[in-house]
Image (spheres, rainbow, N blue to C red):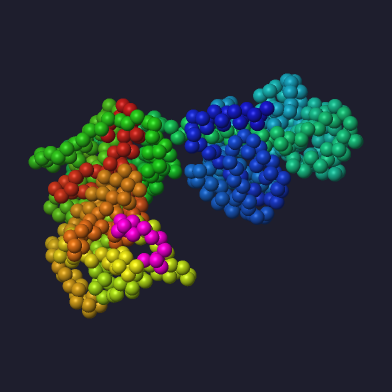
Amino acid sequence: KITENAKKSLASLKRENPRLEPTLAIIQAHNDNLIQEINKNFAKEVGLRVVHICLPEGSSKDEIVSEISRLNEDPNVQGLALDLPESLYSSKVLNAVKPEKDVDGLSDANLGRLVHGDACDCLVPPTVCAVMELLEDLGGKTVLLVGASGAMGAALQCMLQREGAATLSFPAWKAPQLQTELHHVDVVVVGSTKPNDVPVSWIKPGTTIISCSRDFLSEKHKCGQQNNHAAENAVGSLAVAMRMQNMVKTTERWIQSQQYRKWDLHCLKLQPLSPVPSDIEISRAQSPKAVDVLAKEIGLLTDEIEIYGQTKAKVRLSLLERLKNQPDGKYVLVAGITPTPLGEGKSTVTIGLVQALTAHLNINSFACLRQPSQGPTFGVKGGAAGGGYAQVIPMEEFNLHLTGDIHAITAANNLLAAAIDARILHENTQSDKALYNRLVPVVNGVRGFSAIQLARLRRLGINKTDPGTLTEEEINRFARLDIDPSTITWQRVVDTNDRFLRKITVGQANTEKGFVRQAQFDIAVASEIMAILALATSLQDMKERLGKMVVANDKKGEPVTAEDLGVTGALAVLMKDAIKPTLMQTLEGTPVFVHAGPFANIAHGNSSVLADKIALKLVGEKGFV
């Protein structure tokens, strides 16, 4: 009946969430395969996926806690249960399990809710559920708990007393009054193995015996022979069924936790001074909230943020999938304006608006800003964190390295620049065959095209997949890009106003064999990679856009792209973290996304589309971005 109900509940959840695949992880530190099989069979019947993590017998508490911590952070695991030897069920181990994943309900947080009567917020431990299922009409009866101590004993006492039973508890079998009490009680619940020197004759005839001990099952017949009026029930399989029922409840709560969450934002107080201090003094006078606190306040889950220090965090793009059915908020563009003599331009107006809306009018709002370049920051223009009492804090973090996105763009841009010059050099100094052997080398006796090379072959109209079947003419077309050096438009970049790099000569070392050409450095944020970062809608979209970047023409006047050079994957992997927006806060503790920073005089000048899309989901239908 319990399994059938759990199966129906899960089927209903799966109908509403077709991609749902709830996973229960069970950490085991013994060699009892029977328990493992019972768990698997019940899970299969209900429709759950079970993963057993089998640690060696004799594993320490620290090793188990380490494994629990790993599973706590695994977003693909919704529930976590423990099958351990009794000696390992310590407070340290039980409380290492995240309360929201605690299927066995033995953490302090869960037991606290149980004792307080918060039935909807807690899970009753499966063994306790099984005991209560087996016992009926407890009102006025006396129940003796033997060897059921710790979290399990506390939960049992709580549930028994709630049903009107009087309870006595003996943590061990050696208690002096045990024999006397066994003669008077109506029910005995056994939590650990009965020693041989405690005879069954101590138990009053007609007493109900409930065994929660794994080893007690083997004594079933012995009890029956010596005391035929003692009714003894083993909990085993029923507890496993209850565990699966708890897992379904945990899954239901997990689904609810994935839905849009209302903001619970605690704004920071401003203490304006007169005369108004400098921007940096104002910024440093305010103590920002810890970024993980801010993230929780605006409805982000713990596995959706990557924390950089105390005041910055990257936000993962998985959030867009979680909130895909959430309606967007309202989208407000603060466009290019001429700053006032006091420096009130786009950033100050944007920050001032979100502080007014959120901190003073209690309306969800999110500021999305560009990341400043270090060129203007160290030049006459200065930073871009806003000004006065409308700023992003901490100002130094915002204006300088932030989370390294501009450095990632610099690395990707200059990798591509290096690939262009290296390719020209190799094509000028090697035969078609030598080039081909380097591009498609023999590895462990096998030669094969990579995915990006197969794509290039298709673009050239060569529909072959075996490197050994290409003709000499096809090898020439595949191996040679024939870049015309005078048409190279791809420049190296650095994020500093270094005017002496505006025109340079490259290739002057003897190893470059006389291949000298004039080139230049641009500022890093002028890179096309920055423009792409601001427009990308996903990692795959960014990778496709990077591949299409034209870097030069060949000698026939045809465009040569990053994809032709075969570096698209390398560029994308250098940008894999830069694509995630960075979460920061205003002086009043309201949320800000800082992401991308293409200059408006040479590019489209917007902060990132991804930051906007994520913010629109987070603010809710009535919020503003």
Residue 424 at what x, y percent from top left? 24, 69
Give the residue drawn at x 21%, y 57%: 559
Task: Find the residue positioned furthest to the right.
Answer: 226
Dividing the picture into quarters, in which one does residue 198 lie?
Answer: top right
Residue 374 in the figure: left or right of residue 251: left
Which quadrant is home to the N terminus?
top right
Residue 374 at what x, y percent from top left? 21, 54
Q: Is residue 549 magenta?
A: no
Q: Nearer the viewer, residue 161 or 406?
A: 406
Give the residue drawn at x 23%, y 49%: 531
Residue 55 at what x, y percent from top left? 63, 53
Q: Is residue 466 magenta?
A: yes
Give the residue drawn at x 43%, y 39%: 301
Residue 612 in the figure: left or right of residue 500: right
Dividing the picture into quarters, in which one does residue 594 lie?
Answer: top left
Report how many numbered discs are placed on residues in the image: 0
* Above or below, 449 relative to 248: below
Q: Nearer the viewer, residue 617 or 46?
A: 46
Q: Nearer the viewer, residue 246 or 311?
A: 246
* Above or below, 64 relative to 155: below
* Above or below, 263 relative to 292: above
Q: What are the residue bounds of the magenta stretch?
A: 456-470
Residue 5 at what x, y percent from top left? 62, 27
Can the viewer see residue 521 in this picture?
no
